[in-house]
Image (spheres, grey):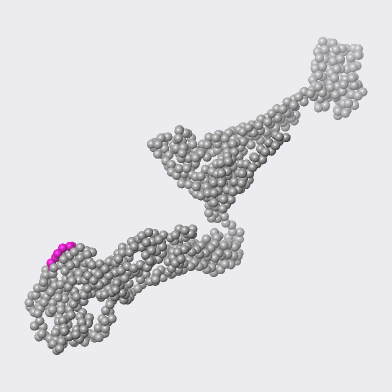
Amino acid sequence: MRKLWVFTLFLLSFHSMAEDHLLLMEQANKYYNEGEMLSAIETYQAVLRTGFESVGLYYNLGNAYFKTNNYPMAILNYERARKLAPNDQDILFNLEIANSRIVDKIEPLPEFFMVRWWKMLVNARSTDQWAHISIITFLLFLLMLLFFLLSKLIWLRKLSFWAGIIFMIFFIGSVVLANQRYQAFKLKAEAIVFTPTVTVKSSPRENSTDIFVIHEGIKVSITNQVGEWAEIKIADGSKGWVKESDFVRI
Amino acid sequence: MVRQYLQLNNMKSLKKIFTTMKTKQQITLIMVFLLFSLHTLLNAQQIEFRGTAKSVVSVGERFQLQYSINAEGTGFKGPQISDFNVLSGPNASTSSSVQIINGNVTREVSYTFTYVLSASKEGSFTIPPATITYDGKLITSNAVKIQVVKGGQQPQQGKSSGQQGTGESVDVFLRAEVSNATPYLGEQIIISYKLYFNNQISGHDGFQKISSFPGFWVKDLLTNQREIPTKTEVFKGKQYNVAEVRRFALFPQRAGKIEIQPAETELTVRVRTDSRRRSSDPFFDSFFNDPFFNTQAKDIDKILHSNGLTIDVKPLPTKDQPADFSGAVGKFLLKTEIDNTEVKANEPISIKLTIQGSGNIELFDLPKFSFPPDFEVFDPEIKSDIKVLPSGVSGTRVFEYLVIPRNPGTFKIKPIIFSYFDITSARYVTQQTPEYNITVERGDGASSVVTYSGTVRQEGIQIIGSDIRHIKLPPYKFQPVGTFFFRSRTYFVCLILPLILVVVILIVWRKQMKKRSNTDLMKTLRATKIARKRLKQAFTFMKENKEDEFYIEISRASWGYLSDKLNIPLAELSMDNVKTKLTAKNIHQDTINQFIENLNQTEYARFAPGSKSENMEKIYSSTINIISKLEKELK
């Protein structure tokens, strides 16, 4: 009996915590709708400080930053939202608009079609969506295994054999894809530049040769790191070294 | 330099003179008469040939050098002028006067040769004498000494520091006046330049040098004025003739103190020389001192400088400044007019936007209509009627828009909001035009829509602006930052639990199978196996010719097979019930009969005498046949 009480209390506390997020979100949305963007940003940030995240939260925060013309912050939050929901059309739309407002317009380097397809596949679903897919395919595989082992009907056994093999391939594939995204997420290998103008150096030294100049809001991928210096790569394939303080990882 | 001679002061009196001496004939008659009658007197007169000029001039100043002789001289030879620039001359002029005093007639003739010179360098210079021939004699004039001083040392504002040697002082100065020395940014102020004078002005440069006002937008207010009116005004206790020579409306373009530099203008002032005769008669004195009888005058060139001004421009208050304020300062009225609010598609609508008022009307942008995107809008026809009056700039600007709604529907033309800074109340005033609701009905067939070959006209959606999409609304799915379902405990549980489940299912299945292996089902499964075993045994017995054992084995094989297959204990089996049991199992009647026949033959052969070895093979093969036949049918 006592245990039951403790359990219900736990449930209640969890419930109220969730309510807090929703109340804060509601308040922030209200500020947003009234055009008080600074208050909206502050309130969305308060939700983030509780240690919880959500696609909607990052997206709305990005929108609020966009409306205050803070494009780097808007892009950062859209990218964070996109990490959680890679194929959300609203996020992609707004991200494109925000990217059109920054200084640098970079023609992305054309990639080998297999690489492009692979990236498309990896980005088609979020990590957890891939995880769910892996579980479903695994269950289907097990079902086919049972059919194969226990059925006396020859055609059913044949069918379940091939279906089982296909589901196994799908299962392995989805785990690999989920892992790919998971590793990228944990690595945080992508970043948004926040310093208005950054001169990219040829090596991780202050007095090395300047290679090119990038501006705030541009997305870079981090390929290496030496102390406070990070080697970055921009969409057109150019590489160079900048200081860690110049960007914020997505 | 083009000289414009204006009759400023003595115009009226001069006119009078000309009207009295109307005909030229009269003048010549008088002249001829006088010349002949007074011929004898002239000889007695002393001949004087004099050169005169200003003794002090400034560099760049234009001045006159005159040689005059009081007799009719010929062959005038001018001096060699090397230190000055000769602008014009020598220009000869003649003047004569006759004076009759108490029957005593005096005639004065004067021949004057005038040079207009300008000094180019500082210093003291002497112009050598000129010569002229009179009555066969060569007469030499005096040399003229001129001192040239640096420019700008001319007396400013004409504070009556007139020329030496003349009887009358020069009293001319230029004043700049401003209507408001502390205007707001963009507020219209009026600056006027007034010429104060008590001398006759015989020439001026048109005052065109007064035109530069850095920091202001300038509008000349006296452009279409041909004559400059004169009035009298008392300044510092002295009466002056005042002419307003220039007048501008100035619109400050930046806040802060703006200096207006003193303006400069060049004038020629006519000064009467003091040639009055000393006469004791008070009556004649007053009579002959009339300007008409005393026309000996001298032109003096003067450069005048006005006073400078400092305008302290106040910035417009930032408090309560409307967001749409575009810099209009003054007093304005905004009006809109529309000719029709209910039209058919493709019929034009004309909308007029009128702004009226005084102030910097030409300097700010007018708000524009935002027409529905579906309207075809033509560039507005702009009519400006700006009146530049001496009181300032005011007027009307009219924007006439022609729009053609292309599709039926109801549309709104949003009001125009216009703000200006009202000078009199020092406040921002916002005006709003009415909103128009326009109903567009389907156009009749004659309109251009028909040209689209009868099909419905379709248009792509016009993207009017680009903006981000709206925020996402609830429900939200919250999760702790950086947590994943992938690789989480739940994930692994979700994978392993079904696997365990499947393994358990398989184990349970197997156990079940084993359990059933003792049961009847298992028996039937094993029936064929046992029968085959027994037949094999029988075969070996047949090879060894062990007849009894062979038949026993065959019999067992047949009966045992049936018992196992039909799940009937051996004891319960007999020749009688075999048939019914097999029929119940849907076995073909022929097969049953064959089987029974085979059983009977086996029993018979077993106990019958004779060559058993022959029968053994026969029975063996038929038993195999029948069992395999049964096996097939029982499946």
Of the 4 image quadrants, the one containing the C terminus of chain B is top right
In this picture, is B226 found above or below A171?
A: below
Q: Which image quadrant is residue B208 in?
A: bottom left
Question: In percent of the image, x 45 and y 43: which residue is there?
Answer: A195
Q: Magenta span has B577?
A: no
What segment carries the magenta color? Answer: B120-127
In-image side of B600 versus B283 (left or right): right
Question: In percent of the image, x 39 and y 71: which residue is there?
Answer: B391
Q: Which image quadrant is residue B297 in?
A: bottom left
In this picture, is B532 found above or below B63?
A: above
Of the 4 image quadrants, the one containing the N terminus of chain B is bottom left
Outermost residue, right side: B576
In this picture, is B512 found above or below A213?
A: above
Residue A54 drawn at (x, y percent)? 59, 42
- Between A237 and A97, the one lying in front of the other is A97
Question: In percent of the image, x 55 and y 48: which residue is there?
Answer: A40
- Between B100 and B92, the one lying in front of the other is B100
Observer able to see residue A199: yes
Outermost residue, bottom side: B103
In this picture, is B530 found above or below B283?
A: above
In-image side of B496 versus A186 (left or right): right
Residue B65 drawn at (x, y percent)? 17, 71
Total numbered badges shown on the rendered structure = 0
In-image side of B424 versus B280 (left or right): right
Residue B367 drawn at (x, y percent)? 48, 62
Q: Which image quadrant is residue B550 in?
A: top right
Name the dominant secondary structure of the magenta segment. Answer: strand
Residue B389 drawn at (x, y percent)? 39, 71
Outermost residue, left side: B137
In-image side of B394 versus B374 (left or right): left
